[in-house]
Image: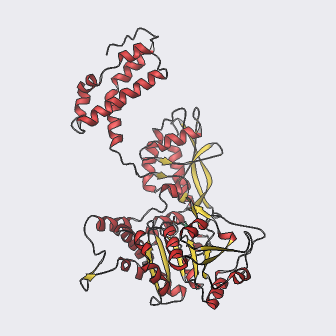
């Protein structure tokens, strides 16, 4: 590479001219070796990109020719890096150190090992998804989770599995849409003004109601709604009363809302079905973990709701799906609606949900990551943080252990705070934003958060098996200037 290293000031033109051609780079031994693993076209593309990168650097004022010369020498490595990135998955595992258990951006609930194994088994071969093995006839995919779902709620909710049904669709939004469409198209749905809310990710109750062809009949006011308000709004055109769990926000002060039981009583008296968009899918009380007060699906069904919709990947701790449990005639109508087919879930979802529900049945809650993280001993989290901080003693990062508060997340229980500990990171010459970005660019990426001008890594949401790798990655971390 004929770069005149003795000239400290070179014009950009000279630097451009010093760049090798694609062919010259291709002929280098280290680049030829890449042809063993990658196609020629890919390698040529990567060389172009790498040279493009160097041109960009020159344009933005790369210093001396000596810099360029060493960059040119390092071309094979940058080319290999470009090739590796091209073959890397877009959807990748990350380490969630945000302390938010159900992080919608990070895929909400992690699946248990057992669920994952069941998915793998079912995914890689054929299955009896729609085959009744006993009779040798076509079966319904519902059967893989319906009996389990009903068994988990029936007794506590005070009904028998004969009177109710449980079906699964793609997510809770679909479950709600489908229910409104099947039961209320062209007719009125009574809903409190305090429940015409946005759940997150663009899921707005008024919009879903409109999309389903139902007519919104608002009752009460934003902060106060009484049974009498629902009563006054009833008419011959009322198809249903909708109740929306205010899962992702809370209202305090001068507020009033009838209990679900009162609404169910009103509905029963007037022969109007009551539908609750319960959202969280919580099947067992969180009181065991010290967080009482978060309503469960069982409570909704015990109150007498005709149908309840929930997510599978929130407080149930399973795969993304929407679960509908309700009275048989109501669910039958929803199941028969043409839209059901458009929200149908695949075998992978059934496999993951079935395995998760079986873990509920055997009370193996420790095996479900969501509950394992909830139950994690705070002192244990603190000592893990201390080990990580100690490993950074001689690195460029300043680390200390601090007490923090985590959250359930995923649009659930906004008031619940999970006492936890975090490794707080600072760098003498880099901003917290730059550290955060460098963490995201690690392999696997580490997702933290910024609080009070430092980066926090809450280890409650980090699998202890990842601690060692996390330490190694942090020790090698080199933030770069200008985080985007
Ligand atoms: C989360 C939530 C939804 C949306 O659930 P998805 O499974 O994400 O579609 C709907 N309603 C309520 C009350 C929720 O909490």
The spot of residue 84 in percent (x, y) is: 33, 40
Ligand 1 image position (quadrant)? bottom right
Which quarter of the rendering shows the C terminus?
top right
Which quarter of the rendering shows the N terminus?
top left
Give the image quarter of residue 15: top left
User: Which residue is at a point 46% across and 22% down the rendered structure image?
Assistant: 59
- 152 relative position to 206: left or right: left
Residue 164 vs residue 382, the one in the foreground: 164
Whether residue 421 is visible here, answered yes or no, is: yes
Judging from the image, the colouring scheme is secondary structure
Residue 298 vs residue 244, the one in the foreground: 244
Whether residue 412 is visible here, answered yes or no, is: no
Give the image quarter of residue 341: bottom left
The spot of residue 345 in percent (x, y) is: 39, 69
- 50 relative position to 258: left or right: left
Farthest residue to the right: give it.
254
Farthest residue to the top: give it.
6
User: Which residue is at a point 69% across and 81% down the rendered structure image?
Assistant: 233
Residue 479, above or below 250: above
The spot of residue 62 in percent (x, y) is: 46, 20
């Amino acid at each position: 590479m004929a770069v005149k290293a003795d000239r400290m000031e070179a014009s950009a033109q000279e630097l451009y001219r010093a760049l090798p051609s694609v062919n010259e780079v291709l002929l280098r031994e280290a680049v030829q070796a890449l042809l063993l693993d990658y196609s020629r076209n890919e390698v040529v593309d990567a060389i172009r990109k790498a040279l493009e990168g160097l041109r960009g650097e020159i344009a933005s004022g790369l210093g001396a020719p000596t810099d360029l010369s060493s960059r040119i020498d390092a071309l094979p490595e940058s080319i290999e890096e470009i090739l590796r990135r091209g073959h890397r998955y877009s959807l990748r595992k990350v380490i969630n150190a945000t302390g938010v258990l159900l992080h919608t951006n990070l895929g909400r609930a992690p699946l248990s090992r057992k669920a994952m194994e069941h998915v793998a088994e079912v995914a890689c071969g054929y299955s009896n998804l729609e085959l009744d093995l006993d009779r040798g006839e076509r079966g319904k995919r519902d059967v893989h989770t319906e009996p389990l779902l009903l068994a988990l709620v029936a007794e506590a909710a005070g009904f028998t599995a004969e009177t109710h049904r449980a079906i699964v669709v793609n997510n809770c939004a679909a479950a709600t849409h489908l229910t409104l469409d099947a039961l209320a198209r062209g007719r009125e749905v009574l809903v409190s003004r305090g429940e015409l809310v946005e759940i997150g990710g663009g899921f707005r109750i008024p919009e879903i109601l409109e999309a389903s062809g139902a007519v919104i009949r608002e009752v009460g006011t934003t902060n106060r709604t009484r049974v009498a308000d629902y009563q006054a709004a009833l008419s011959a055109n009322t198809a249903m009363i909708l109740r929306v769990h205010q899962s992702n926000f809370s209202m305090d002060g001068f507020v009033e809302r009838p209990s679900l039981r009162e609404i169910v009583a009103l509905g029963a008296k007037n022969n109007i079905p009551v539908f609750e968009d319960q959202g969280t899918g919580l099947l067992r009380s969180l009181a065991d973990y010290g967080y009482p007060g978060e309503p469960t699906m069982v409570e909704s069904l015990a109150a007498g709701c005709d149908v309840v919709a929930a997510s599978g990947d929130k407080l149930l701790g399973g795969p993304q799906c929407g679960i509908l449990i309700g009275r048989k005639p109501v669910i039958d109508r929803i199941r028969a609606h043409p839209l059901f087919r458009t929200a149908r879930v695949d075998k992978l979802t059934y496999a993951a949900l079935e395995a998760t529900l079986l873990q509920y049945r055997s009370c193996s809650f420790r095996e479900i990551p969501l509950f394992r993280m909830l139950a994690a001993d705070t002192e244990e989290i603190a000592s893990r943080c201390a080990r990580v901080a100690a490993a950074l003693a001689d690195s460029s990062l300043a680390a200390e252990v601090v007490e923090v508060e985590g959250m359930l997340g995923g649009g659930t229980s906004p008031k619940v705070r999970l006492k936890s500990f975090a490794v707080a990171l600072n760098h003498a010459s880099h901003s917290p934003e730059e550290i955060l970005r460098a963490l995201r660019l690690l392999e696997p990426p580490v997702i933290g958060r910024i609080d009070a001008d430092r980066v926090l890594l809450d280890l409650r949401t980090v699998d202890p098996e990842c601690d060692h790798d996390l330490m190694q990655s942090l020790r090698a971390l080199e933030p770069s200037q200008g985080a985007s």
